[in-house]
Amino acid sequence: MALWTMILRKMANNKWLQLNLWFGLTVCVALFSSMPLYSEAILQQTLLKELQQVQSQSAVYPGFVRVSTTVSSSTKDKETSEALVRADRFVQTIPDRAGLAAMSFYQQRFTQKMKVYGADASDQEKQSQKTAGSFKSLSGMEKRLRLIDGRMPVDRTDGVFEALVTQKFLFATKRGLGEELVAESPEGDRSRFRVIPVGIIETDPAGDPYLPYLTTEAEDGFIIPFEQFEREFTKGGKTRLTDLEWRFALNYEQLNVDNIDQFIAANTDIRRYFRGRLGVEEINIPAIETVGSYRGKQAKLDVLMLSLYSPVMLMLAFYLYMAANLIIERQKTEISVLRSRGASRLQIMMAYALESLFLGLSALAVGPFLGISFTKVLGASSGFLEFVQRSALEVSLTSTAYKIAAIAVGVAIVLILIPAFLATRTSIVGHKQQMARLTKMSFWHKTGLDVILVCLAVYLLYNFNKRQEDLKRLALDADALQLDPLLFLMPALFALGGGLLVLRVYPWFIRLIYWAGRRWWSPALYNTLVQISRSSGQYLTIKVFLIMTVATGLFSANAARTINDNMESKIQYAVGADMALTMRWKSDAPPPMSSGSTQQPQTETGIAETRRIQYTEPPFQPIQELVGVEAVARVFKKEAVRFSAGSNGTTGKTVLFGIDTLDFGKTAWMKNGLLEYPINSYLNLIAPNPKAVLISRSLADAAAIKPGDPIRVSWDGLDQAQFTVYGIIDYWPGWNPLPASGDAKDGQAAESHLIVGHLGTIQNRLAVEPYEVWLKLNDGVSSQVIYDQLAEKKVPVAGLRDAIQELILSKNDPFRLAINGVMTLGFVISMLISFFGFLLFWVLTLSGRTLQYGVLRAMGIPFRQIIGMLVSEQLFTSGAAVIIGVFIGNLVSEMFVPLFEMSFSTAEQVPPFEITYQLSDYVQLYSIVGVMLTIGLLILGYRLSRTRIAQALKLGEE
């Protein structure tokens, strides 16, 4: 009890310090708990959205499960009967296997097809009648079918089957409702069954919204009561059973990221069970492809978030260590006195461990709920420091979040106890000696940790760049390289190592300033320079902390801007404009041949005739008249066009673009800086000459040609057309200049070539073939407006790429949301922690130097000069740290932001990955730091003004 009393009194005496420490622990818990909360919530949301898209695109309920199998056994035996019972029993376990509740279920059974004719049919009619149908059973048919005439059948035991039929089938039998029919088995015994159609049915859409029964799927047959079918055919064996079918509508909204593996395993179990067991099986689970794509996504997203959080976590760990160290520094005298009076190190550590445990449990009680708020911030981000009104993530605390939070608290407590452990090794005499040695070298510099961290980061960066070059050279996908999460931790480690390395030489820089102006410095500045140069270790913690804050803040801002800009540029460049559509062209192409006739028509000489297809161009005016469209351009694109050029007659394949220069210049999207001159300059260059073309640099190098040289082009047996090279380009909207994946030869991927010419010339001298139509929309015009007009004008659209919609999908991608959200959250938390850390350090420093300021005031130095000393001290410590942080932040961005290129498909990264800087981010950072320093100075000045000289001097006497 006495120990708890001592701990509580000590915490009460240092309540503001303890509050700062608790704040750091709470933020730490919130960060760690938000990782599993976000990854699960965002993947759950996107999974449900994609499943709903399955329903809208294919008109199938996302939870639909269909199991169908034939019955290969031609005779009814005990083994087949037992197999049917086991199959029914297995099917009933499907919902439990999938982990989803069954919203609806029905099953069907089918007999073999039989010849159907009227009971009063003559021999001639029997001979000519071709109608065939089977007996069918449908569980729960009363609620799934809609009677349009007649009544529901009853189960009769007199050998007559009452049945439901479709209008089409009844018409085929040439009989009316209530007239007896005969179903004759094709088996050798020619069994005959008496059937009376008593009702005509059609699909009832309102009968079961989840799993409607469609009468159009099997119109030829008799639906009889399920119990009668089981008795007469399944168990009675009166005719051959040929097909079985079970259908489920499972509640897909219960599907979450945690039971994806269970759902996939259920799909595997179903297929394995029915494979060859009764006959030929057919399993249809439309959601399996979508669900399967999420397998392992949560683990990848967790790794990505851990990597992105690592700079903030490192800074948070530094904050906790700094706060704990400041607390211990104030209590070192107390600790050394306890040691001198016989207290063991274990007893002292036990007291601090209980104190830290109390703070940790308090943080664990609050942190996860703060983590929910962090998660919602992540879900609302659409860019760096940008938020939108989208449906909020449904977040709920899980055991995983609490486990991770508890681990984080445990590690944080260990980190907090390190300063206390080091302090317990010092006696009262050693403590006084340490207080007198203010110029001793810090642990970081003594061990050379700064050099080690910088070298490690540079080494890993070198390995990354080397592997990245291999990916581009071989045109491999980014997935071919296993990402090391440490690569994303390197920026933080480099920032820490770089900051420590600069601070190693910074005291010498201060001494140089002191030495250069020692004759002219004012007393206030003189005192400041002496204080900083002699006590550099005292300021090391706050300077490193500020450097880490500014550097990681800039890195987060630049990384987020770069990723967003490159992803959006990639989509816009690939499409070429806001929208690119293709229309259906009429042609004289022969219809597709059936599988039975694969021979080409031959001439009299026996040689297959090859004839070019002639196309008819659809009207272009309806596209030009679309409301909300700023510009329209026709763009002809042809792959694998043959070219011949150069003095050596170099030949090869290239991509051919045909454009109208004026329309193309108004419509196409092109990123600045990709070409040597603006794209319109190239268009103006070729506009006067119909035979002028632009070629890619890869083609110019391969064929050794230059502007002014001729080049010949043809395809599919056409006569070659000659053009003149007017310019050489590296990029062009809609063209990928990177080597094509899969075409690598001898370790080197084949290069891609391009020729850009006039559309009219290509059509006149070569051929008229289908082209794309590119659209540039007016600002604020939505894609749906264009879609509605295309449908209204009945434009025969065959294909469409919409850059606007692709950008929206890209912004809603879980991984991009995580990047933007974590970067934004990291930036805000960095600034917040920096502010608290700054105030904490300087308030404690001021409290520790109360005697010094009292003596200076007693010596007659006015308060204004004391404030000047404080301001100059801030500029040479905090101000210098901010400047160093900006320098290191920019350096870290230049070196490590390209790491995020690995998040893109390397073979499709066009335009090339480019680091993006935005002035507003720097303005925000400088504003926040400026406000922080100003508030800190005001608080410190206020506390200094309240200090009384007599009290300060009396404190010195004590």
Image (tube, rainbow, N blue to C red):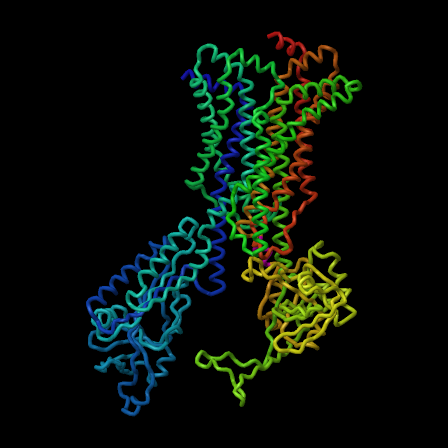
Q: In the shown orientation, is residue 640 left or right of residue 49? A: right
**Residue closest to the eye, 711 or 126:** 711
Name the image quarter holding the C terminus: top right
Q: In the shown orientation, is residue 47 left or right of residue 630? A: left
**Residue closest to the eye, 395 or 178:** 395
Q: How many numbered discs?
A: 0
| Residue 797 placement (x, y as % from top left) | 59, 70
| Residue 927 placement (x, y as % from top left) | 69, 36
Name the residue rendered at 61%, 43% in the picture. Answer: 896
In the picture, residue 888 is in which quadrant? Answer: top right
Q: In this view, does 531 lie above or below 132?
A: above
Q: Secondary structure of the magenta portion, mostly?
A: helix
Q: In this view, does 549 lie above or below 646?
A: above
Name the residue rendered at 70%, 18% in the picture. Answer: 530
Identify the residue at the far top of this view. 957
Q: In the shown orientation, is residue 257 left or right of residue 825? A: left
Identify the residue at the far front of this view. 648
Identify the residue at the far right of this view. 520
In the picture, residue 765 is in which quadrant? Answer: bottom right
The answer to whether residue 710 of the structure is visible from this angle is: yes
In the picture, residue 866 is in which quadrant? Answer: top right
Q: Within the magenta stretch, is there residue 193?
A: no
| Residue 343 placement (x, y as % from top left) | 44, 13
The answer to whether residue 634 of the structure is visible from this angle is: no
Q: Is residue 352 above or below residue 738?
A: above
| Residue 946 placement (x, y as % from top left) | 67, 17
| Bounds of the magenta segment | 805-810
Name the image quarter holding the N terminus: top left
